Image: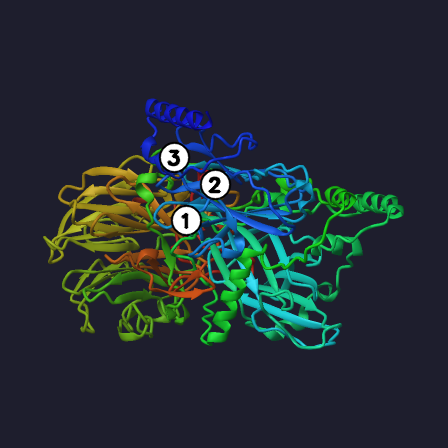
Amino acid sequence: MAGLVNNLLILFLVFQNICLGFRSPLSVFKRYKDTARPFSSECLGSDQPVISLGLSDFALDIRMPGVMPKQSDTYLCMSVPLPVDDEAYVVDFKPHASMDTVHHMLLFGCNEPSSTENYWDCDEGTCKDKSNILYAWARNAPPTRLPKGVGFRVGGETGGRFFVLQVHYGDISAFRDKHKDCSGVTLHLTHQKQPLIAGMYLMMSVNTVIPPGEKVVDADIACHYKRFPMHLFAYRVHTHRLGKVVSGYRVRNGQWTLIGRQSPQLPQAFYPVEHPVDVSYDDILAARCVFSGEGRTTETHIGGTADDEMCNFYIMYYMEAKHAVSYMTCTQNANPEMFRNIPQEANIPIPVKSDMLKMTHGHHEETKDTDKSSLLQQAKKEEEEILDQGDFYSLLSKLLGEREDVVHVHKHNPTEKAESDLVAEIANVVQKKDLAREIINHDERDNTILVRDRIHKFHRLESTLRPPENRHFSLQQPKHGEGSWEKEHTGDFHIEEAVEWPGLDLRLGQVSGLALDPENNLVLFHRGDHVWDENSFDSKFVYQQRGLGPIEQNTILVLNPSNAKLLRSMGKSLFYLPHGLSIDKNGNYWVTDVALHQVFKLGADDKEPLLILGVALQPGSDKNHFCQPTDVAVDPITGSIYVSDGYCNSRIIQFSPNGLYVNQWGEETSLGRARPGQFHIPHSLALIPDFSQLCVADRENGRIQCFRLETGEFVREIKHKSFGRELFAVSYVPGGLLFAVNGMPYPGEAEPVQGFVMNFSTGEIIDTFIPLRKSFEMPHDVVASEDKTVFVGDVHARAVWKFASTEKMEHRSVKKAGIEVQEIKGKGGGGLNLGNFFASHKGYSRKGFDRLSTEGSDQEKDEDDGTDSEEECSAPPPPPAPSSS
């Protein structure tokens, strides 16, 4: 009968989902039907393992198939295949177990379970390949409700294909009535992509030695964090019997912030991080385990047996999906000296009452009847005293569907076989015995169970799981055409900083322009010891610092894009305030100087210009003058020259290959919404030969406008809310990708300064990126190559960053303890800079080409006034004036 019900259920689900348009229902459930295991009639609710919850959601019931353990401290495992072929996300857990029967449950994810039997003794292992902890439960933990937008990634090309449930039956006295157990967990899964992905960070000592009789022995672990920001929300400590206290910290600028501190002799559950902690690039994660060797007669080493020791600190975190890493480890001490400043609390053992020790270690000694009342009284007292910090609502110890891009962020690659074997041994024990705790078999009295039940409860779960309100990314999926969550446009393409590129350390002036030459070398244009500030120009845009003379340093530098080595340089004594740079197909450099109001063509090896457009130091708006021209683009087919002009004019001018005026278009932005063809500082140009278009970064209008090359006819606008008010630069890569950088947000606005990758055809955002080392202050230009290597120059930070797509990052694998650890070169992680940009404003009026407008300057950042002041000269009415550049 049960089999008939199963078949009818599956047919119903298939029919239902075909009617609803759900993709491939037969393929979704066929694998589960083929591998479904028989359940005991006593397992109520387990005869419907897969339940459809709509078009994109379903529930998966994972239960023990009616087992009856024969002895205490039995570990039994069973496996269930993921019933879908594509990627899914676990967003909710509902446990089905009682501590009267079950000591704890662990749910693993992997591709090959250790056995194909209905269930097996976990001493055989959980998985033959790498396994990841997805979920942990103990002591009547309530259902886990994840915050909106957070999920665990499983399945797909890189995720695990099987769930393996491990159940530890501590005391078999509950089975005296010969009933069969069907404990387990129900998962709520969805196909909808989640913007936040959870993961686990394991800190583990591998070389600690505890001398016999030694009263205090410290095991310290510390690693520099080198990835994108992560938010910590739970922790777990683990040692064997000699451990007294384990503490974990984030160390930033010498300040120690507690992640969690607990006695490893209490139930080793996941506990909520009391105050949410974020970790950014170059923070240090540090942990200390305090041991005592008293009572031992021989040295104690790190290992997997009850006579060995362990020092583990587990951290649960979540990250933005596009940067998410499911598993990270730290097994070294990168800075032993820093532990001289560890907070004193880390050295103070946490008292643990003897009855708690008995419960934790499984010592269930007979208690006299006269002790029952005192035991229960003590339980009530502890119930009132102990902070509700039990087994962190079944916490989702994620590593689900461990991806192939798993990163060992600290690049610790054990070379000695002994250390590798040790890590493997530890992992093996972790799989088998509740993260390596060896528990001695003893009977457990009913009253002890009651004590354990009453002590371990927790109330603050929802609040500790909720993501911080001030995180700077939205959980709302944008409407079509407005953001980067469009499934068909995101894929696995991501841009991240190449943190090993040394170019960030170059000593430069204000970096105003970037380009790539025909050999793909990076060419940058900088201002040497000159700066653009409020004293640079008068109200008619005449340069006021001619007395300084031209820049005496070489302003054009050619760098090897791989190692940032200087290949050649030029441009000494030619320029006053460099701005835009482009390179034509023949390798000629085209540059603009906003002080000279001119455009120059330079040969790669020529000291004198090959062509000059404009009149030196004379601003104007006719055919022969420019007013602070910003950029140049040269058509590779016709040789036509296009100049964006500029800060004081609002136009694009076309010249013939020999510099004769041909055409111009554009006008100043009118009040209200900017119309097509109107500009408010046309700041950067990108020529799109594939489509015969010229795209303009219309800076103060915060948009990109594209025009036909031949006529200047408006084609379309690309504008996103995430651009904010300013869009500084744009670059095109043949094949259809558009790259851009925006400006700092105005006070009270939240859009961060960042880089964008867009699909040129649709205009939709594919990815965004930010630096990990330092922060964007005023990213002024961007250039990208066909292999998706991106360079960004910042006029205020005086720096150049290199970014690369994750699909081309060089990486290598290290096999440790059955867990595949990827070490990825050129990748890092962290550093959102979302500070507000406080600008000063000026009003002024002009006549003729000095018409009323809003202009900006690349004013030098004032380090003393506490603001990121980029002088913004502006005229009424109220709308904020532009940032400088």
Question: Label 1: which residue?
Answer: 160
Which residue is pictured at 30% across the width and 61% down the height? 514
The relative height of residue 245 versus residue 838 in the rendered view (above or below) is below
Residue 180, image quadrant: top right
Disc 3 + disc 2, Cβ < 8 Å: no
From the viewer's side, name the closer residue of 487 and 386: 386
Label 2: element kind: strand
From the viewer's side, name the closer residue of 617 and 732: 732
Q: Looking at the picture, which amino acid does disc 1 mark? A: Gly
Residue 843 sits above or below residue 14 on the image: below
Q: Which residue is mark 2?
A: 90
Disc 1 residue crowd, few under 14, some 14–19, many 20+, Cα 10 Å: many
Q: Nearer the viewer, mark 3 or mark 1?
A: 3
In this view of the protein, which residue sits in the foreground, 705 or 566? Answer: 566
Instruction: In the rendered view, tell whether residue 398 sits above or below residue 808.
Output: above
Which class describes the residues within 10 Å of circle 3: few (<14), some (14-19), or many (20+)? Answer: some
Residue 666 falls in image quadrant: top left
One can see residue 647 in this view: no
**Which of disc 2 and disc 3 is earlier in sequence?**
3
